[in-house]
Amino acid sequence: MFTPCDECKALIKNQNAYLVDVRTPPEFEAQRLPGAINLPLQTLQQTAEQALEKDRPVVVFCRSGSRSQMAMQMLNQMGYEAVYNMGPYQAWYQCED
């Protein structure tokens, strides 16, 4: 279900993937991951096309993994083909950079 953190970090480093936090702005401000952009799930359909190029991979995450799963499905429906769900943001810290 979730893409392992080492694969996510490799996508970001080697394929210039976006790291997208779909949590709310207050959640994003409280705990930011390096290089992440905040596109809350509630506004993702309205903001994704301005913020994300469709030819770049997208790694999504949230607090528990459920919102990021919904975000992955939304982005796939919008034509983004390479979307990966890292799950909870804490997964970022489970592997080395």
Image: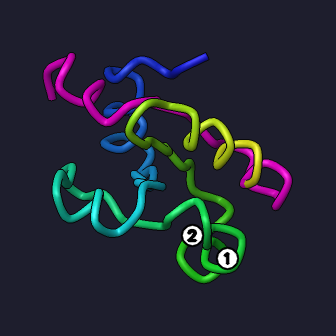
**Mark 1 crowdedness (10 Å alpha carbons): few <14, some 14-19, many ≥20:** some
Q: Amino acid at mark 1?
A: Glu
In the rendered view, how is the structure colored?
rainbow
Q: Which residue is mark 2?
A: 52
Circles 1 and 2, Cβ within 8 Å, touching? The answer is yes
Q: Tell me which residue sits at (34%, 23%) in the image.
A: 5
Does 50 sit left or right of 11 as displayed?
right
Q: Tell me which residue sits at (42%, 55%) in the image.
A: 23
How far across and down, in percent of the image, does residue 33 sit? Answer: 21, 49
How far across and down, in percent of the image, does residue 10 sit? Answer: 35, 31
Does 68 sit left or right of 97 as displayed?
right
Q: Which mark is residue 49?
A: 1
Toward the front, the furthest residue is 26
Within the image, what quadrant is residue 66 found in?
top right
- Towards the viewer: 15 or 57: 57
How far across and down, in percent of the image, does residue 8 sit? Answer: 40, 31
Task: Confirm whether the magenta stretch covers residue 50.
Answer: no
- Towards the viewer: 87 or 80: 87
Task: Name above or below for residue 3 compared with residue 81.
Answer: above
Task: Name above or below for residue 76 compared with residue 39.
Answer: above
Q: Which residues are magenta?
A: 75-97
Does 79 sit left or right of 87 as displayed?
right
Does 6 sit left or right of 97 as displayed?
right
Task: Name above or below for residue 6 compared with residue 66.
Answer: above
Q: Distance of mark 1 from mark 2, alpha carbons? A: 6 Å
Q: Tell me which residue sits at (28%, 66%) in the image.
A: 26
**Mark 2 crowdedness (10 Å alpha carbons): few <14, some 14-19, many ≥20:** some
Q: Amino acid at mark 2?
A: Leu
